[in-house]
Amino acid sequence: MLEIDGLQVQLDADAGLVRAIDGMHLTLARGETFALVGESGCGKSMTALALMRLLPENGRIAAGSVRLEGQDLLTLPESRMREVRGGRVAMIFQEPSTSLNPVMRVGDQIVEAIEAHTALRGKAARAKAIDWLARVGIPEPARRIDDYPFRLSGGQKQRVMIAIALAAEPDFLVADEPTTALDVTIQAQILDLIRGLQRERQLGVLLITHDLAVVSGMAHRVALMYAGQIIEVAPAAEFFARPRHPYARLLLQALPDAARRGEPLAAIAGTVPPLWLDFAGCRFEPRCDKAMGHCASTPPRLTEEGPQHQVRCLLYSQPGEALPRQPAVPRPPPPEPAGRGAPLLDARDLRVRFALKAPLFHRGARHFDAVDGVSFKLHAGRTLALVGESGCGKTTSGKAIVQLLRRQASVSGLALFDGRDLFQLQGQALVQARRQVQIIFQDPFASLNPRMRVADVLEEGLIALRPELDAGQRHERLLTLVNQVGLRRDALQRWPHEFSGGQRQRIAIARALAVEPRLIVCDEPTSALDVSVQAQILNLLRELQREQGLAYLFITHNIGVVEYIADEIAVMKAGRIVEQGSCQTVLRQPHEGYTKDLLAAVPRLSNPAH
Ligand code: SF4
C-alpha cells in the first residue's frame, strides 16, 4: 500500500544542513500496522510530515519517493494532495490543542470531515458524528457535540481529533503518538477502536510512538530509528523476543518493570547526535556498549539477519574485537533500608475542596471535592505510588502535602510530618517544613524559569529556606548538587533552554535536593521523557533514596514505573483511595474492580497482540 524509497529530508538550520531523514526505505501493506519507534529527534515525526508533505518551511525532500498504492505523493500537484490529506490518508497528531479550530463547535468539525469524504449529509452526517464521539469515548455525545473545544479536557480534545481523522473513513492512518496524552483506560479504548477499524476496513496504520508496550500490542512490524536512519526492522514479536541492534537491546532493558526491581535500569549514556554532523562511521558508536575499533570509521548498512529482519550494525556484517567500555547496566546496589518505626508522613482524612464560581443568575458558591478523605502512611526511605486516571485527585493530594494549595483551596484533615501537622504550621515552623517537603513536576520545560541561570534556580530555594548559609557555603552546596545529579560544574552558568529534557529534570531534582528535604513529591517526573532518559532519572532517584533515606510520594499513571520503584501503592478514583497495600499484593492480586480494570488496560510487552 505504501512504499517509501530512498527518502531524504533536509532542513536548513543555524548550525548547518540537518539530514533529518537519511535514506529511508519501508513498505507497508493494507491492513498492516507498522510502528516507527525511537528517541526524540531520531526522525520519526519528520517521516510522517514528509509523507504528508507538511514539512516545516526550512525543510525539503532532497531525494526519494513516497508511493501510495502506486501513486507518487511527492510529485502530486498540491490541489490533489489536499484531497489525499484528511481523505484517503488521515493523520492524528499528538497535540490536540493546536489542531482543533477553537471557534467551531466540535460536532461541526466532525460533520465537515464526514460530508467532505463520505456520502452522508445534514442530519445523517450529524447522527454519524454523534456515533463517532461515542466510539472515541466522549460521555454524553449528543450534548457534547455542540460544545466548543475550550470546554473539553486535553484528553477529550485528542479523542475529538481521532474522531475527525477516522470519520473521513481513510484507507491509511498516520498516528503520531496518538494516545500519549490519554489515560490508560481511554488509551486502551482508542487502540481497540483503531484495531477494530483496521480489521473491518483493512486500514493501513503507520504508528509513531516511543511507547514500546503500545507497539507490542498494536504493531505487526517495527522499525527502530536512530539519528535519521532505520537501524532495525523486524516483525514485532521477533523484535521484542530477539532484538539484534545494541541500541534496541538497551532500550528494552531500560524499561522499568517488576522483574527489574532492586537493580539499576540500563541507562544509555549520552544523547542522539546532532544531524548536521558528517558521520564517518556508526551513528550510535559514542553510546554503544558493544562498539568495536572500526565502528567509528565504517558506516554500517542494513543487512538481513533473519526472515524479514534487518539490522544496521557491524557486529553482524563485519565482526571485530570489542573496545573496553563501561557496561550499560551498572552493578546492583546494596539492598535498600526497609521502612520501620513511625511513619515520616501520616496523612489522615485529607480533603481538598475547591470553590466553583456559581453560574450566572445562581446564588451561592458550589464546591468540588478534588480529594475526599484520603489516608496513607509513608516511611523514610520508602516510596508510595499514588496512581489513577487524570482528575482522580492524585496530583491535588501531592500539592496539598507540599502546601501549594493554601490559597486556592480549602484543605482539611491531618498531614502529620514527623508527628507535627503540616496544615497547622505557621511562621518559622512552616519555613522548616517547606524545606523538608519538596516537589518535582512532570514538565521539566515548564517548571524552570527560562530567565534564570541554573545557579540562580538552585540558589533561590537555598536563600529562602537556608538563610543561615553565606554565599561561599551556598556555592559549595551548588557544586555538590550538580555533581550529585550527574551534571558538570559548568552547568551552573548555563540557561535552562541549553539543556535536554532529561538534563532539565536533573536540574529540577537538584533544585528539590538543594534544601536537604526528607520527602519529595514526584509528580509524573518521567512521563515527558524518552525511555532511556527515564531510566537515568529513575536510577538517580533510587540512588538518592538509598544514600539519603528520602521518602517519595510518587504520582504516576505508568504502572511499569510503579512496579519498578514503589514499595506501596494507593489507587485513587474520584478523590478517594479505592485500594492500597504493598506494591506486590495490589499489582498481583488486586481486589477492587477499578484496580483490575486499570491494570488490565495497561499495555505490556508481555502481551503482544500478534
Ligand atoms: Fe555498536 Fe558498532 Fe554496531 Fe554501531 S556498528 S551499533 S558501534 S557494534
Image (cartoon, rainbow, N blue to C red):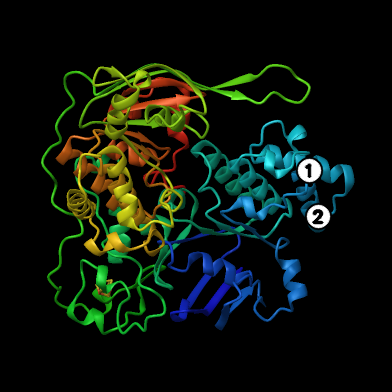
Looking at the rendering, the quadrant in which ligand 1 lies is: bottom left
Q: Quadrant of the N terminus?
A: bottom right
Determine the residue positioned at 70% across, 40% down: 133
Q: Which mark is residue 118?
A: 2
Q: Which residue is nearer to you in this view: 207 or 519?
A: 519
Image-quadrant location for residue 413: top left
The picture places residue 174, in percent across and down from the top left corner, at 59, 60
403 over 302 or under it: above or below: above
Determine the residue positioned at 46% across, 50% down: 446
Q: Which residue is nearer to you in this view: 379 or 457?
A: 457
The picture places residue 162, in percent across and down from the top left corner, at 64, 49
Image-quadrant location for residue 580: top left
Q: Earlier in the sequence, mark 1 or mark 2?
A: 2
Which three-letter amino acid code belongs to the residue tagged 2?
Thr
Which three-letter amino acid code belongs to the residue tagged 1?
Lys
Circle 1: element type:
helix
Mark 1 touches mark 2? (CB < 8 Å): yes
Asked if residue 197 lies left or right of residue 440, the reply is right
Mark 2 residue crowding within 10 angstroms, few (<14) / some (14–19) / many (20+): few
> Outermost residue toward the right?
122
Q: Which mark is residue 402?
A: none
Determine the residue positioned at 24% across, 50% down: 265
Q: Could you give the CA–CA distance between mark 1 and mark 2, rounded to whole angstroms?
A: 11 Å
Q: Mark yes or no: residue 243 visible.
A: no
Q: Which residue is nearer to you in this view: 416 or 190?
A: 416
79 over 352 or under it: above or below: below
For label 1, the residue is 128
Give the number of callouts.
2
The picture places residue 190, in percent across and down from the top left corner, at 58, 44
